Amino acid sequence: MRKHAEKSKIIRSSPALQKISKKMLAQGKSIGLVPTMGALHKGHVSLIEKSVKSNDVTIVSIFVNPVQFGANEDFAKYPRRLLADAKLCGEAGASIVFAPEPKDMYPLPLQTFVHNPALENLYCGAYRPGHFAGVLSVVAKLFNIAMPCKAYFGEKDFQQLHLIRRMACDLNFSVKIIGARTIREKNGLAMSSRNEYLSTEERAAAGSIYAGLLAAKKLHGQGEVSAAKLKSAVKERIERASGKIQYVEIVNKNDLMPVGTKVLRNAVVLVACYFGKTRLIDHVEL
């Protein structure tokens, strides 16, 4: 386990990283992987620190994955700042930053995708066709390249985390998937690289997302089981702050299926909405 901050080594080549990982594993060292798309924030740092505490080597991948972006999404303008991110990784104790170019990850146009037909077109997937197939496929590639013992993901992307867990189980990946709690800004807004797109006013107003989720959680704690009323509590606060709802859904925590009209236990509220042109997601467990 690394005890002092130092500079992370930047690896740009998949074969080079795979060779290093094989050597580390042969030496009996444990590898932790933190997959990211860069533009790192405190949420990412918490994942890196969690990995550093539990593994001999921590690899942070920084790759803006083109196959998970739709035609009208923000691939071109997604924030990229490798040197600043690598510095942050080193300060958090990461050993290696894996920062491939798309041509390294996809030397040929990708034809083989990982799909979850039961879940990939629900919730966020309904509005972002092909997104989760792109996510699962690149994560599978990262697992094969970095060969981690454990991989760390934020719980903010709740549907994504569930899909990755299911993929690892269904396809017998030996990696253990670790979820970490959502890190929030002072007003409750879940930290995200996309928060950089928000104006000062939008950023302040977006605190209403978590306020709405907490209102639903409080209502449920007081005995309210109507899914419609719990959803309304979320929608009301976001819309009052000039947010535009894309969806609010209440799902079973264990399988992500909709709960129906009554919400009893093991439920999660998922929300996606817009403030200005920026799409934000969040969730709360009831």
Image (cartoon, rainbow, N blue to C red):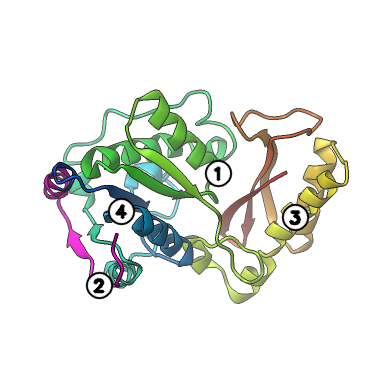
Mark 1 or 2: in front is: 2
Mark 4 or 2: in front is: 2
Q: Give the residue drawn at x 45%, y 26%.
A: 116
- Label located before the other in sequence (1 or 3): 1
Tell me, yes or no, whether the two marked residues, 1 and 2, touch with CB atoms within 8 Å: no
Disc 3 residue crowd, few under 14, some 14–19, many 20+, Cα 10 Å: many
Q: What residue is shown with label 3? A: 214
Is residue 213 visible to us here? Answer: yes
Q: Nearer the viewer, residue 244 or 147?
A: 147
State the separation of the CA atoms marked 4 and 3.
33 Å
Q: What residue is shown with label 4? A: 63
- Label located before the other in sequence (3 or 2): 2
Residues rendered magenta in the picture: 1-23
- Quadrant in the picture for residue 198: bottom right
**Secondary structure type for disc 1:** helix
Find residue 105 and report its horizontal and vertical position in percent.
Answer: 22, 44
